């Protein structure tokens, strides 16, 4: 989705079972991904 504010990126992940999903979420991965995407955005916007 493009608009004047930017683009929307949707990431879908499929896990083999609920236990694996819960283990991945428990690692703090979501916070790390947010940090990485924020750093990427900074780099892209800076030229």
Image: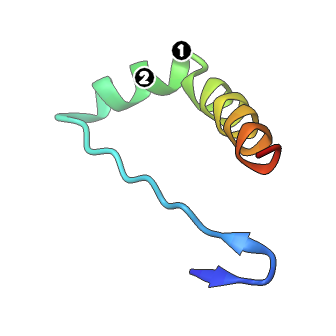
Confirm or deny contact between disc 1 and disc 2 (CB under 8 A).
yes
Mark 1 = which residue? 27
Q: Is residue 47 left or right of residue 40?
A: right
**Dot 1, how many residues are within 10 Å of its Cα: few (below 14), some (14-19), or many (20+)?**
few
Does dot 1 land on a helix, a strand or a loop?
A: loop
Residue 18 position in % (x across, y down): 30, 34
Residue 15 position in % (x across, y down): 25, 37
Among all residues in the image, which is located at the extreme bottom?
3
Among all residues in the image, which is located at the extreme front?
47
Q: Is residue 19 left or right of residue 16?
A: right
Residue 40 marker: none
Residue 38 position in % (x across, y down): 75, 38
Among all residues in the image, which is located at the extreme left?
16
Q: Is residue 9 left or right of residue 43?
A: left
The Cα–Cα distance between marks 1 and 2, rounded to whole angstroms, is 5 Å
Out of 15 and 35, give the one closest to the viewer. 35
Mark 2 = which residue? 24
Number of numbered discs present?
A: 2
Q: From the viewer's perspective, is residue 6 above or below residue 44?
A: below
């Amino acid at each position: 989705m493009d608009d004047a504010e930017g683009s929307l990126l949707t990431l879908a992940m499929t896990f083999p079972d609920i236990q694996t999903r819960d283990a991945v979420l428990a690692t703090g991965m979501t916070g790390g991904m947010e940090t990485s995407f924020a750093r990427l955005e900074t780099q892209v916007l800076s030229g």
